[in-house]
């Protein structure tokens, strides 16, 4: 397992506010191999973005803290790097795409100069001409004519802005790309375009990617591995085949699939998961999903389930499968 | 990949493109936008004319003979070809005094903004960007100074530091700093939370770069407006200080001082007050127009 690019071990993240301590990430274990794409799925507030921000070490100052665990990126112990080293890593080796392209570009700088900035930061040895050529190349790569680089973000459509954001993220040829719901703010036709493009660029450049989303369709389309997140924990992980074709699932995953419309079956109503995620400020004892689970037992209320092995690459965190697993 | 091929195949074209890109530097685009704004151009023209007149005063007048030396036989002359605006109570040419006065007033006014802008940006931006205890400490100090009336503070500082031009500028700059810091802080605060600031951090940009390249240019609007107003206020503050003998001392011409001196002659010789008054209004107005236009020109979203 030496070709792991990113290894997250027992990560705990907490937000400390005046009113309460919010436990956003509770013991996440993840690993990502070079060139692979991991889909991180879960509902709003499950801690997906927090996880990505911790990898970048960009949790909000004075509020967000990593309280335990380790993140290893490419031999580096991320939590132990100095702020200066971290800055060198950001944008060059790890880069991030934010959810809303409308707000993640600086409105008063031309798009060209924004792509140029990241090059200037990480390749100070390049001349302005070389950088300009690279900016042209990046823009052509994401399918925007390079002669538009002197224009401002408001002159582009949402999809094109997201392409620019992607161009910025990929400009330095990063090893890891964290995409935080990159297509949520786009309409469906553009979504497909942007995703196909991201997938193409990713394989061209050999970048690994963590794709944060709540759209299972996207996951099926472009991910190699999937991790389902709930209340700051990973409740199920495996390859795309494990999750989409496997027979054994965490009740939450079953619920997630039940909540999306299916064209093949004739159903009148969707099946949403009843109830809400537990308040991350006061997490219950035992399994966090117990309140919403139809298979809930006494044991679920008192004892936190272990990550169980249910297949070659497939893991589920649920008491239901205690007997089936090899552990 | 086809896109890469196109680029490499036409290296010359890329070079050409780059030239175009380089030529359209930020300064250039801002200037192009500013040119379209008629009011701003009017402001710029008026202010340039004022500057040219003020700086070229020596061509038409002799500082010592026309603006300083007293000719008591010539006092309170009405406007004539010899004295275009008439003379004051000491027989000095009013036009010469207004023009020479501009040197001091405008210089002190502009130097004051430079001081308060620099200090205000450093204090305000770091308070807003870093937040937490940095914000608390800086803003409580600012609040403390805000509690002292602006003129009183300038007065105290001049009295403490001694009466000189440099100290005057320093005192007025410092007394404008708390207000400016507050303003910069509030302008920066909203922008610090924007996604593009987060995005810049995620690209590995340093704090200083984020503040100066990403946040401040987006917050420039209110700061610029405040800065142009500061010029007006500082001209009036100098006059207040001059009035009690702490600003510019008597024979030296200065707009504010001339204005307050003309007060006693208002009834019979209104031109003594009108001339420096009009000078103050014109320069402040032209700066305000220019400032407004500049603010609009700096925001590409307003471009039509």
Image (tube, coloured by chain):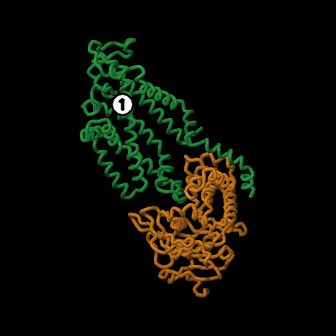
Give the x, y percent position of residue A178: 58, 64
Residue drawn at point x = 69 percent, y = 49 percent: A145
User: B195 or B109: nearer the eye?
Assistant: B109
Give the x, y percent position of residue B106: 39, 31
Dividing the picture into quadrants, the one containing residue A15 is bottom left
> Chain A appears what colour?
orange
Q: Is residue B295 above or below residue B285?
A: below
Asked whether, in this view, residue B301 is left or right of residue B76, the answer is right
Q: Which residue is mark 1?
A: B104
Which chain, by letter, is green?
A: B
Q: Quadrant of the N terminus of chain A?
A: bottom right
Is residue A70 in sight in this rendering?
Answer: yes
Q: Quadrant of the C terminus of chain A?
A: bottom right
Q: Chain of mark 1?
A: B
Give the x, y percent position of residue B210: 49, 53
Dividing the picture into quadrants, the one containing residue B84 is top left
Crowding near pointer 1: few (<14 within 10 Å), some, many (20+)? many
Give the x, y percent position of residue B142: 33, 48
Is residue A158 in sight in this rendering?
Answer: no
């Amino acid at each position: 397992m030496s070709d792991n690019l990113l290894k997250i071990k027992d990560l705990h993240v907490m937000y400390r506010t005046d009113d309460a301590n919010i436990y956003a990430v509770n013991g996440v274990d993840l690993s990502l191999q070079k060139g692979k794409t991991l889909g991180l799925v879960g509902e709003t507030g499950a801690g997906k973005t927090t996880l990505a921000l911790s990898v970048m070490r960009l949790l909000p100052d004075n509020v967000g803290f990593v309280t335990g665990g380790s993140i290893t990126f490419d031999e580096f112990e991320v939590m132990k790097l100095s702020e200066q080293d971290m800055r060198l890593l950001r944008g060059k080796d790890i880069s991030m795409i934010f959810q809303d392209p409308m707000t993640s570009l600086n409105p008063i700088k031309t798009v060209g100069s924004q792509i140029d900035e990241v090059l200037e930061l990480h390749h100070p040895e390049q001349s302005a001409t070389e950088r300009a050529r690279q900016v042209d190349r990046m823009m052509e790569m994401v399918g925007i004519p390079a002669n538009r680089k002197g224009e401002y973000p408001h002159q582009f459509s949402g999809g094109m802005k997201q392409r620019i954001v992607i161009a910025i993220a990929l400009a330095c040829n990063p090893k890891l790309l964290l995409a935080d719901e990159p297509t949520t703010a786009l309409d469906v036709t553009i979504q497909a375009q942007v995703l196909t493009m991201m997938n193409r660029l990713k394989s061209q450049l050999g970048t690994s990617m963590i794709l944060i989303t709540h759209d299972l369709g996207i996951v099926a389309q472009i991910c190699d591995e999937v991790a389902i997140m709930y209340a700051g924990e990973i409740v199920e992980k495996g390859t795309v085949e494990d999750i989409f074709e496997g027979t054994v699932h965490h009740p939450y995953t079953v619920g997630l699939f039940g909540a999306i419309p299916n064209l093949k079956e004739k159903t009148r109503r969707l099946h949403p998961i009843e109830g809400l995620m537990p308040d991350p400020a006061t997490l219950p004892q035992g399994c966090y999903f117990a309140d919403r689970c139809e298979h809930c037992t006494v044991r679920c209320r008192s004892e936190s389930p272990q990550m169980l092995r249910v297949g070659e690459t497939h893991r589920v965190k649920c008491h239901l499968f205690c007997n089936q697993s090899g552990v | 990949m086809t896109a890469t091929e196109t680029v490499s195949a036409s290296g010359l074209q890329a070079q050409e493109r780059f030239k175009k890109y380089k030529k359209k530097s930020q300064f250039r685009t801002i200037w192009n936008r500013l040119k379209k704004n008629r009011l701003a151009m009017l402001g710029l023209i008026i202010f340039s004319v004022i500057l040219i007149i003020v700086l070229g005063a020596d061509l038409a007048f002799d500082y010592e003979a026309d603006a300083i030396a007293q000719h008591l036989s010539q006092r309170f002359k009405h406007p004539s070809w010899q004295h275009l605006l008439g003379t004051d109570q000491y027989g000095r040419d009013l036009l010469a005094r207004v023009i020479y006065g501009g040197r001091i007033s405008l210089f002190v006014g502009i130097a004051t903004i430079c001081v308060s802008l620099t200090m205000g940006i450093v204090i305000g931006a770091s308070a807003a960007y870093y937040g937490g205890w940095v914000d608390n400490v800086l803003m409580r100090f600012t609040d403390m100074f805000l509690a002292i009336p602006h003129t009183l503070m300038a007065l105290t500082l001049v009295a403490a530091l001694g009466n000189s031009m440099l100290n005057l500028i320093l005192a007025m700059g410092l007394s404008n700093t708390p207000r400016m810091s507050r303003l910069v802080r509030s302008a920066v605060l909203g922008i610090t939370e924007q996604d593009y600031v987060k995005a810049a951090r995620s690209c590995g940009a340093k704090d200083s770069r984020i503040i100066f390249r990403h946040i401040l240019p987006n917050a420039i609007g209110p700061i610029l407006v405040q800065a142009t107003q500061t010029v007006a206020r500082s001209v009036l503050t100098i006059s207040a200080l001059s009035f009690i003998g702490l600003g510019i001392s008597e024979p030296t011409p200065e707009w504010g001082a001339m204005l307050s001196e003309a007060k006693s002659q208002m009834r019979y010789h209104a031109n003594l007050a009108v001339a420096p008054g009009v000078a103050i209004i014109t320069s402040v107005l032209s700066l305000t127009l220019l400032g407004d236009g500049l603010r609009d020109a700096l925001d590409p979203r307003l471009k039509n």
